[in-house]
Amino acid sequence: MTVTGTVDRKAPGALRSAGSFLRTNPTILVGLSVLAAFTVVALIAPYVLPDPVRVNPIQRLRPPGAEHWFGTDQLGRSTLSRTLNGTRISLTIGALVTLLTVVFGLLIGLVAGFVRWLDGTVMRVMDGLMAIPGILLAIALMSLFGSSVQNVVIAIGIAEIPRMARVVRSSVLVLREQTYVEAAITNGARLPRMLLRHILPNAAAPVIVQATYVFASAMIVESILSFLGAGTPPTIPSWGNMLAEARPFMQRAPWMIAFPGVALALLVLTVNVLGDALRDAIDPRLARKLRV
Amino acid sequence: MTSYVLRRLAATVPVLAFVGLFVFFLLRLTPGDPAILIAGDQATTEQIASIRTQLGLDRPLAEQLFTWVGQLAQGNLGRSVFSDMEVTRLIGMRIEPTAMLALVAILMALAIALPLGTLSALNAGSRIDRMVMAFAMVGFSSPVFVVAFLLVYVFALSLGWFPTQGYVPLAEGLLPCLNSLVLPGLALAMLYAALLARVTRASLLEILAEDFVRTAHAKGLKPRLVVLRHALKNAAIPVVTVVGVGIAALLGGVVVTETVFNIPGLGRLTTDAILRRDYPVVQGLILVFSLVYVTVNLLVDLSYVLFDPRIRY
């Protein structure tokens, strides 16, 4: 009874504050809506569209028209179906890389921020990883791992984790000097409780902002890896694979490049705009400075 | 100054040592036999065995590490499995196109970003500002090969102004060389320009609100001179920092751009080496790219003195 009572009282309040947050930040609302639209497309595409890998040689390289809205590729596969199905792959890889990066970034950042004697070593390793250009690191890892969706996620994740760990560590270093954290320690709060109640909620903002950038960057890197032949297996209709296959037909069938290319740029743009808007909303001081 | 440079140089040693170790262990600690991995699926047992001896993979790990470090210290990166050439020579042959491409891209990015960022900051909140920032956002979000395809389609295939692909070596003349780099340079510069325009704007806005800028205005200095002589120079440090950090993105973009435009540089070498599982070459390239990144950022740190005489090392 009490439990449901609390939830009932709390939920509308949380919803209302989320609602008013979105009303005062229309960019975030628009960004989330577009992202939701992409997600819906990703979810329903396999059920309403023809099989993206079905080959139909008679209908090859057809330009966009009434019959094939986005045209067809060199094997007669529907570009519409492949592009929309590609959304799912990009979003999945983006989301998994973000998850991986946040989990390990938090873990490494918290350890570096709290365990003094490990800090130097851990951060030197992170610096070393950051000295290898991210795309190159991911390519090198993929050349050893072999192409699969899982390996793409791990390879991009390894390249993204150091930056996230840095963001977490710098927040922790600031937070642990705060009076309320010291007070909690004086009051005998144990480490896990202190992390959950005091550190994590206050470090959340920069982590969320960084996570949106990771999400966008992961989708770009995935497409680059696939484009170079070191990403998702060629049988999967990811945007990078589509663009790689379309390259020899650039002059004859530009639509094969245009649709996945624009879809990719649009999705990444949406996530980046969302990231910027979140940063501005979360750090009003910085936002004022940038807007003036 | 000298002691700072030495200290700063010393600080790059552990970073580079880590990259070296990482590259060494990456191949050795990957599950499975690295010799089979390099030889590929169709290799015979003899081929696998010869790769194993060639790379010294049959020796104890400690001995391998010792040899690797010793060779590195002498600037020896081993031999290519595919072409049996020395990796250093292979890399040396491919440096020119990449260096030219990177240089052209950086100059283009600065030529686009500095005026646009300044324009944006001077007209903060206006329609021009919003347009420039929207452009930067789109540039920041467009994958380099999508931009490359667009440029090729418009300026090479449709208008025929520039070649669709290929690279003309510097030896055949500066202008033909530059002409072959316009489209790849622009494609590569886009992301960089977007990043720099945003930083230029933000940094300049902060400086324009400072007291000394108001003083300069108050003493009757022409607005143009206030911006050029006082504000821009003081706004330079964050911009230069991003030039350094952006090198990582640039080097990654080089790999893609060279593949799209068929430029025989280090990026193309990277893709080829990976597709051929030529691991000594991949290792060497990662080391070289990291060295470039670390060196550029070292130079960036040292260049702060030029922009702010208050900084002393």
Image (cartoon, coloured by chain):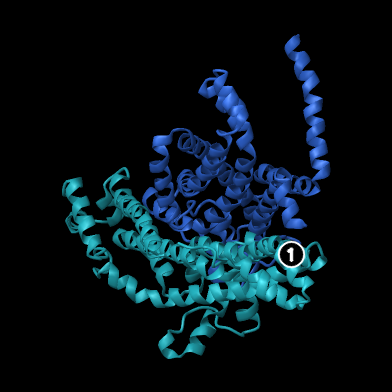
**Image quadrant containing the N terminus of chain B:** bottom left
| Mark 1: amino acid | Gly
As drawn, A81 above or below A208: below
Q: Is residue B8 left or right of residue A70?
A: left
Residue in the picture at 43% in, 35% down? A116
- Mark 1: secondary structure: loop
Which chain is the one coloured blue? A
Parent chain of label 1: A
* Residue at which label 1 appears: A65
**Image quadrant containing the C terminus of chain B:** bottom left
Q: Where residue B189 appears, x then y in whole percent? A: 58, 70
Q: Where residue A48 appears, x then y in whole percent? A: 70, 45
Tell me if I can see residue A71 in this picture: no
Q: Where residue B141 appears, x then y in whole percent? A: 64, 59
On the image, which quarter does residue A189 sit in? top right
Q: Is residue B100 left or right of residue A266?
A: left
Q: Is residue B159 left or right of residue B69?
A: right
Q: Residues within 10 Å of mark 1 (few under 14, many from 20)?
A: few
Q: Colour of chain B?
A: cyan
On the image, which quarter does residue B78 sit in? bottom left
Residue in the picture at 35% in, 54% down? B19
Tell me if I can see residue A36 in this picture: yes
Residue in the picture at 38% in, 65% down? B2
As drawn, A96 above or below A226: above
